[in-house]
Image (cartoon, rainbow, N blue to C red):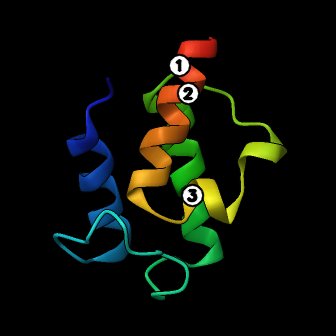
C-alpha cells in the first residue's frame, strides 16, 4: 500500500488546491497543465521507484488521484 498523503501533498503543491476529491479528473477540472503532468510523472517515478512506460502515461492512469494510486500499486506488484 502506498502513502497516498505524499501524492496528495504533491498534487496540492502543483495545483495550489487543498483537499481535491480523489475521484475528480484533474485534467477536465483544469487543475493540471501539460508541464504539471511532466512534474507529476517525475515525482511518481522518483518517489515510488518506478519507471512509467508511454502506455502507462494516460489520462486514465493520471487523471484522478484514485487512478494514480491504482496504477502505482499495480506497478509496485509487478516490480
User: Could you say where residue 43 lies in the image, as x and y percent from the top left?
Assistant: 48, 43
Q: Is residue 77 above or below residue 59?
A: above
Residue density around tag 2, few if under 14, some if 14–19, many if 20 or more, within 10 Å: few
User: Could you say where residue 77 lies in the image, as x and y percent from the top left?
Assistant: 54, 14
Residue density around tag 1, few if under 14, some if 14–19, many if 20 or more, within 10 Å: some
Quadrant the N terminus occupies: top left
Q: Secondary structure at mark 1?
A: helix
User: Could you say where residue 28 lies in the image, as x and y percent from the top left?
Assistant: 54, 86
For the residue pair 22 and 34, the one nearer the viewer reads as 22
Q: CA distance from mark 3 to mark 2?
A: 13 Å
Of callouts 1 and 3, the N-terminal one: 3
Of callouts 3 and 2, the N-terminal one: 3
For the residue pair 64 and 35, the one nearer the viewer reads as 64
Q: Tell me what residue is drawn at x 46 percent, y 26 percent.
A: 48
Residue 69 lies left or right of residue 22; in this view the side is right
Q: Which residue is mark 1?
A: 76
- Viewer-nearest of discs 1 and 2: 2
Q: Tell me what residue is drawn at x 60 percent, y 53 percent.
A: 61
Residue density around tag 3, few if under 14, some if 14–19, many if 20 or more, within 10 Å: many
- Viewer-nearest of discs 3 and 2: 2
Q: Which residue is mark 2?
A: 74
Q: Tell me what residue is drawn at x 54 percent, y 65 percent.
A: 63
Q: CA distance from mark 1 to mark 3?
A: 16 Å
**Quarter residue 18 falls in:** bottom left
Contact (Cβ within 8 Å) of mark 1 with mark 2: yes
Q: Is residue 52 above or below residue 32?
A: above
For the residue pair 63 and 31, the one nearer the viewer reads as 63
Amino acid at each position: 500500500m502506498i502513502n497516498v498523503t505524499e501524492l496528495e501533498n504533491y498534487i496540492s503543491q502543483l495545483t495550489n488546491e487543498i483537499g481535491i476529491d480523489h475521484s475528480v479528473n484533474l485534467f477536465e477540472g483544469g487543475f493540471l497543465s501539460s508541464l504539471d503532468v511532466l512534474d507529476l510523472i517525475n515525482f511518481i517515478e522518483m518517489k515510488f521507484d518506478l519507471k512509467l512506460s508511454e502506455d502507462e502515461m494516460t489520462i486514465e492512469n493520471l487523471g484522478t488521484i484514485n487512478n494514480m494510486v491504482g496504477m502505482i500499486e499495480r506497478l509496485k506488484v509487478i516490480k
